Image (cartoon, helix red, strand yellow):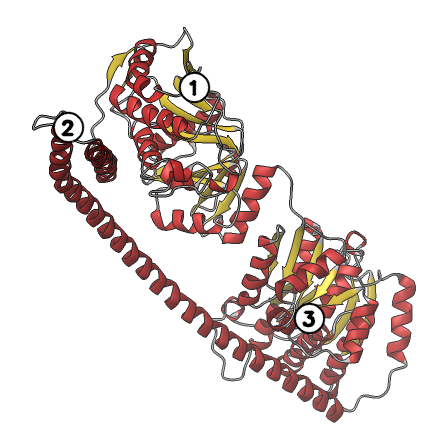
Amino acid sequence: MENRYEFPLLTIPLRHDRHVVHARQRARDIAAELGFEHQDQIRLATAASELARNAFRYAEGGVVAFSVTASKPQVFVISVVDKGRGIPNLAEILDGRYISKTGLGMGLIGTKRLMNHFHIASTDIGTEVECGKELPVIAAEVTPSRVKSISTKLAGGNAIDPFDEIERQNQELLKTLAELKEKQEQLADLNQELEDTNRGVVALYAELEQHADDLRRVSDLKTSFLSNLSHEFRTPLNSISSLSRLLIGRTDGELSAEQEKQVTFIQRSAADLSELVNDLLDLAKVEAGKVDVKPRQFEVSEFFGALRGMLKPLLAGNSLDLIFESHPDIPTLFTDEGKVSQVLRNLISNALKFTRKGHIHVTAEHTAEGWIVFRVADTGIGISGDNLGRIFEEFVQIEGELQSQVKGTGLGLPLSRRLAGLLGGTLDVESTLGQGSTFILRIPAYFDQSQPQAQLQSQIEEGSGPAILFVEDNRETSFVHQSALKNSDYRTFFVANIPEARIAMKQIKPRLVVLDRLIDEKDSLYYIEELRTLGYSGPVLVVSVVDDPQSATNAGATAFLAKPVPPFTLLNTVRELVEDSPSKKILLVDDDEVTRYLVGGALAKAGYRVLEAHGGREAVRLILSDNPDAVILDIAMPDMTGFEVLREIRGVASSRATPVIVHSSRVLSQQDRTALTNSDALIYSKQSFTEQGGPQGLLDLLIATGIGV
């Protein structure tokens, strides 16, 4: 500490026991004059007392000097010099390895822990100990005139009674012990809550794993049941159809008009049931992974001609126009023609059922990325936005004016979507109620059997907003990410490795890519450059257990989050990256982890970005560095009280007008409330958060201060 004697305040020679008490009292008085808080006054007085006691007891010619440095920031310095024989084993004492029967060295260790600055030099002709603490940010600058004023007050002080000082010291000790006991009880409660929470999380993961196994078994049983049932149904259905044809063909004699009508009904019912059985069997095969893709080369123009011939009987007695149109630049396709035909037949058949007049337009085009896009557009009744996702669920049939007039199984569209995924493509729909629908089938022009086929569509959430692609190989982490975004409007897609991600990028156009850094135990940051090379210009969020944001940024990532990622942090980060607009920042200051979790979660769901501080000093640092839009502040904290933090906030020009909401379980006195009001702070107790207005009351208070989402 250079220039430490530029502003000397007081010097006390250590000739008698009472001078040690005098040093303690004067250290506290000077600290109060310099603007230190009560707890810091006690720390400084204790340090001065311990150093003075050591010098008086173990040496001679001791002197205690108090001064303030002229450096920035200014430091209150306590210097104790003696003319003793020095301190043996000094290094062991400072490292805490020296064991003394008399207590030698304990004062040094304690002082070093209490102070921001500490220096000691000891030789065989004496020892000099110097310690200090930086003046508070809001304290007035110490100048020569102020030094003179402080020295005058100290000179005019009352005579010191050692017994009064000891009594005061005991009171301070009792208060500190009471606060320590309270903190120990709080820590014990928190440890118990964390232990209970950990047990609950372990039990939850075990239950989820059990549910996943149960679902897999149920799925296998369902597939086996559908497959066996379909096969058992086919034999009697074929018999019914054959016998019906024999009767209608009058092989065994004439039928009356009524009998012919009855047999026709039987034949139609058997045909409907046969269609249902075929769909069930196909669906069961796809789910069981027993459907093979048999690609071959074919031309779209010839394929459309064959499709038109197959569907011609359905147009009999119908005034609709069925139009096929393909672009001339479409290359030869290499994929499973039968499955493409099955999907388009189902889409066109549905369009014919739900279109009274107008036309059905089937088109095909080739994209620059190598995709073939088939569109089946009709002028039918259309589908409402609420039902666009439901039509791809099994056995779901949307109620409508034509629904009672047409028959269906509710399996055609789910089966078609699964077949599209099997071919490496997607099936989507665009529709407006009363104006018709357009079903869009996208498949690669060349089916690459060596590449894994990403089954993306089964992972789409019900949202209709921007798509987000997660590249994550850990199933539990994917579940956590999916849960964090389940109440949002985003559509989430999950793949387990880079090859699947490459296919997914061809099938969808995500607004955001969330990339796990370690996939299959390999660093995946190289994929960011690959994305940029292929033309993806959207944001990339890297999440990893390796807390190394700089490497992710250097590789081209837009943002970085360290695992485990709190759900509200993931939701806020995704929202900011997708919408390209920063959220309002709220600094949440509380030493209780459970409170930070509950309040932080409520704020994040409302759209705020939450910064967390475990104590007052961390809060002051974040206020100066991050400039939050508002502060939610607890009162009782281990290092600084909420009142001290509030004074620091109001003492800095940049945060003088920052809204502060005091959120504490402490019962505030009228004096406390007046002090908070004078500092422009609002009050929303923790009891109100849990019992009355809840999170909404806190959000309303933020909005009232002008900090709305």
Graded by Cα atoms within 10 Å as few (under 14), some (14 to 19) or many (20 or more), the crowding at tag 2 reads some
List the residue tagged with mark 1. Answer: 319
Q: Looking at the picture, how far across and down is residue 15, in whole percent?
A: 74, 84
Does residue 627 lie above or below 312 as drawn? below
According to the picture, the residue beneath numbered tag 2 turns out to be 245
Residue matched to label 3: 641
The amino acid on which the numbered mark 2 sits, given as a three-letter code, is Arg
Q: Residue at x 11, y 35 (%)?
A: 239
Q: Is residue 84 visible?
A: yes
SS for callout 3: loop
Q: Amino acid at mark 3?
A: Thr
Q: Residue at x 47, y 77 (%)?
A: 99
Q: CA distance from mark 3 to mark 2?
A: 91 Å
Q: CA distance from mark 2 to mark 1?
A: 29 Å
Q: For residue 25, which quarter of the picture?
A: bottom right
Disc 3 crowd, CA 10 A, few/some/many (<14, 14-19, 20+): some
Q: Residue furthest front?
A: 256
Q: Is residue 395 left or right of residue 120?
A: left
Tell me: residue 116, above or below residue 580: below
Which circle's residue, 2 or 1, is located before the other in the chain? Answer: 2
